[in-house]
Image: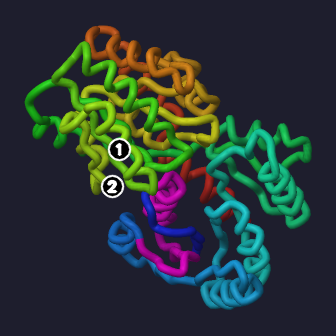
Amino acid sequence: MIVHVLGNMTAGGNERLCLELVRRGPPNLGRALIIIDPVPAGPLKRLFESIPDLQIACEPYHRNARLRFVLGLAKRFRQLRPRGIISYPFGLHLLIAMAARAVPDCRFISHVGNPPPPYGPRRAVFEQIVYASRLMRTPLWSCSRTVHDQFMQLGLGMPRDSRPMPNGVNIEALREAAERGRATKPAGGPIITMTARLDAIKDHDTLLRAFALVRRQLPTARLWLAGEGNRQPSLERLGNELGLGPSISFLGVRRSVGELLGQVDLFVFSTTPAEGFGIALAEAMAVGLPVVASNVPACREVLNAGECGILVPPRDVSAMADAMLALLRDPALARAYSAKAEARARSEYDIRSCAQHYYDYLLDP
């Protein structure tokens, strides 16, 4: 039995990685998913429920009832008797690891999805979490080399067996879905997309402003934003202020990201230095889309320092618009970047390799 402990079933990078790892659990070995959100719901719920023989349970976490949470989770672990546990909620992994002690010889991994803050009180909190993880011998597997290195820069060292383990995507499934999407591509001008949560870690504002500049040169261009989040109302207002009107569409969470990617001409990933990996970036690369991305550490790593896509300074509206126009106007340039991006996705970000590393560690006798 392998147990995955997840915060909720939204469509973020942690949740999508968990979904793919659960799907690739070793044959003839049980698998369970424990959700700690008091309301176990979200756009990925149906996908998790469609996995054969997956046991799904809820062990709600309440901030003012931590001991009850640990005891309840420990009881559930004793019932399941897992050989390995993967925890996805960083910080709360300390409580989950305490509960895991109820099962002798159970291996444990805490997935880490974002880097520590560069300064301020929250950085001190991250330092305390890393120190506690070392005391508890809880390995931290970071979603990218970038995140791992930034944790090392805290100066505390990392727990034994910690490592960078880049997220993976299901390349073949994405490419098959993209082919279906291409068959239904809408007629008209070029379509640009960004698939990401609509929250403060991303930088949709710069993308909207850059797209407004693109529209001056290419009036038929359209922008599709896939994802949901608490910033949607403010982004809709900004789109109206920029006069984008029907040229911009908020699509919500898409059931098939691959089909969406097959319908578009350009992928843009406008984000902030708080980005840990950008699984949507790897998905776009996997289906051979040309990419423009913010020049922040995670995007530099995924795009191989700009070899596999155009990197632009963060929050630089003009530079982002220029890069978008360059790829839309020059098909040969776009194809060159696309080929390099697809090759890198295959060599570095295949979910099969990622899953193999996780399960080899958890099942090592």
The answer to whether residue 176 of the structure is visible from this angle is no
CA separation, marks 1 and 2?
20 Å
Q: Residue 332: x, y in percent?
A: 29, 8
Task: Give the foreground label among 1 and 2.
Answer: 1
Picture layout, residue 6 above or below residue 174: below
Task: Name the kind of residue labelled 1 in the image.
Answer: Arg
Q: Are marks 1 and 2 in contact (CB under 8 Å)?
A: no
- The disc at residue 253 is 2
Q: Residue 294: x, y in percent?
A: 52, 27
| Residue that appears at 87% across and 63% down | 132
The answer to which of marks 1 and 2 sits earlier in the sequence is: 1
- The disc at residue 195 is none
Please identify the quarter of the rendering in which residue 118 is found. Answer: top right
Q: SS at mark 1? A: helix
| Residue that appears at 11% across and 40% down | 184
Q: Residue 76: x, y in percent?
A: 63, 88
Task: Name the kind of residue labelled 2 in the image.
Answer: Val
User: Is residue 311 found left or right of 163 in the rendered image?
Assistant: left
The answer to whether residue 227 of the structure is visible from this angle is yes
In the rendered image, which quarter contains the N terminus? bottom right
| Residue that appears at 86% across and 58% down | 128
Residue in the foreground of this view, choosing between 49 and 89: 89
User: Is residue 105 found left or right of 82 in the rendered image?
Assistant: right
Q: Is residue 212 magenta?
A: no
Please provide the residue range marked out in magenta.
12-41
Q: SS at mark 2? A: loop
In the rendered image, which quarter contains the C terminus? bottom right
For label 1, count other residues whose C-alpha is less than 10 Å away and answer few (under 14), some (14-19) or many (20+). few
| Residue that appears at 51% across and 16% down | 307
Picture layout, residue 355 above or below residue 179: below
Residue named by callout 1: 237
